[in-house]
Image: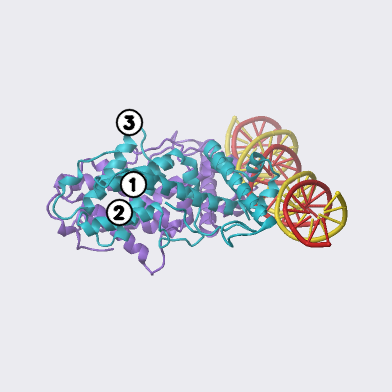
Chain colours: A purple, B cyan, C red, D yellow
Amino acid sequence: MKLPGRERKGIGLSLNEGQELTGARRWRARHRDEVRAAILDAARELVNRHGASGLTMRAVAEAVGYSPGALYEYFRSKGELLETLYFQGSEGLNARTAQVLADAGPETSLLNRMRLAAHAYRDYALEHPDLYRLIFSIANTTGSELPDFEDSSFGALLGLLREAAERGEVQVDDPLYTATGLWAFVHGFVMLELTGRLPSQPEGIANELFDAGLKVIAFGLLPRDDHRSATGGTSV
Amino acid sequence: MKLPGRERKGIGLSLNEGQELTGARRWRARHRDEVRAAILDAARELVNRHGASGLTMRAVAEAVGYSPGALYEYFRSKGELLETLYFQGSEGLNARTAQVLADAGPETSLLNRMRLAAHAYRDYALEHPDLYRLIFSIANTTGSELPDFEDSSFGALLGLLREAAERGEVQVDDPLYTATGLWAFVHGFVMLELTGRLPSQPEGIANELFDAGLKVIAFGLLPRDDHRSATGGTSV
DNA sequence: CAGTATATTGAACACTGTTCAGATTAGTGG
DNA sequence: CCACTAATCTGAACAGTGTTCAATATACTG
């Protein structure tokens, strides 16, 4: 899975645009990207350790050994930093999903692969709860919408559904619509879970709730005949 | 639909607890509730007009003609104010949902009532986008979980599903699980929509996506035989 | 080595939520 | 009607936030 070709939104000169820069410029650009990465790493760790409220420009600056004002040489605003964090988070989600799908051989039914992907997505979110919540709470102003999600986890899901629809393993009006619906369910579930709006009482209740929801959706996707076949299978 | 009996979390004395207070206390308590309501109204309007970032204690104070510090006589913190706003928002959601369900006579199929409820929920959220986003972005620390959602919209949905399951109109393992799944889908969809992560390109695409998702879930709920019957019906 | 574009600082500005001592208010008992 | 007490409210302050900007330091180039 290659990284999305999305161009960087930062300011100033940077790598991977004009190709081979020579001499100083090249050196500078490299250094610039390293510092940017360091800042992002520090920000990410700050969120994961101390929650969203722990992510302050001053704290980030101290973590990378800079003065607060210096950060504005690399990011126009805190918002842009968050936005970048969002893209990186998406990539993490995608990587996780893709990995799981790759691990599941072609002997795994497509419906089960769909469930595997959903679980991978949720697991990732639960491992970085504050980051996920923060990232999906801010509005996406970058106009990046569905179309260019080529190798996003959404895209993977979409491909899966298309393949399943062609094989007749699944019956959908439009895979794009269905993929959106599944994404909405998974995202909504995780969001409710992370904001403490789902029961946590009996240990593992959330897992069951999640599986039950997936099962309903899976049933809804089945062709009009064989309902039973989706009941069994690998429960992750 | 009566208001939930949830006790108020505020500080100081207030009405509807010890019943008939006499004299001054009573007067004070009434005044207190009025001011609290005014503050909440101002806060709500502030969010709806200028977004979450427009909701500052100073702005609220000015709106109600008080000094900033005075607000802390009525709410321990901004967080508590938000929490109260959350409960009120939930009640608004519930009222809307209940209203729609009441309007739909018993001639409406339960599956269609479910869809009506979902649409009512979404419509309400879209009418107060910033408020909804703000409210569901903060963690719910009050430990109020599923069980006591007696007359929440979630509860209404649950009742609907139970009734449908008994009549055999729907086939579910556990209505509670299914209701959670549906809620997750609706909430997730609205959340993605409000944070600009769904396509808005062709006018009305979001509506179609929403309906498609609901349809998949509806199919998944149908008993193993009559798949077709859920296709038609009132689309809101 | 001098020159220059980039990096970095440190202090400031306008905000934020929150606290608190003191002044103001309002209903009550005498 | 007045003094009393308890609830209110103010205004100033504090610590913290994101952000800007003149001045300084740095590091590569010709």
* Residue at the limit of the structure toward the left, as seen here: A225
Callout in the foreground (1, 3): 1
Q: Residues within 10 Å of mark 1 (few under 14, many from 20)?
A: many
Residue at screen point 25% across, 45% down: B108
Q: Which of marks 2 and 3 is nearer the N terminus?
A: 2
Q: Do labels 2 and 1 share a chain?
A: yes
Name the amino acid, label 2: Leu
Distance of mark 1 from mark 3, alpha carbons? 30 Å
Residue under numbered circle 3 = B202
Residue A16 vertical position relative to residue B166 in the rendered view, above or below = above
| Figure quadrant of residue C16 | top right
Question: Is residue A220 toward the left or the right of residue B54 in the image?
Answer: left
Given the image, what chain letter belongs to the residue carrying mark 2?
B
- Name the spot of residue B25 as percent of width and height, x first: 67, 57
Q: Earlier in the sequence, mark 1 or mark 3?
A: 1
- Name the spot of residue A179 as percent of width and height, x first: 28, 45
Q: Do labels 1 and 3 share a chain?
A: yes
Name the amino acid, label 3: Pro
Question: Is residue B79 toward the left or the right of residue A171 in the image?
Answer: right
Q: How crowded is mark 3: few (under 14 residues within 10 Å), some or many (20 or more)?
A: few
Disc 2 and disc 3 in contact, CB within 8 angstroms: no
Given the image, what chain letter belongs to the residue carrying mark 3?
B
Residue under numbered circle 2 = B160
- Name the spot of residue A107 as percent of width and height, x first: 18, 58
Distance of mark 2 from mark 3, alpha carbons? 34 Å
Q: Are marks 2 and 3 on the same chain?
A: yes
Residue under numbered circle 1 = B101
Name the amino acid, label 1: Leu
Front position in the image: A51 or B169? B169
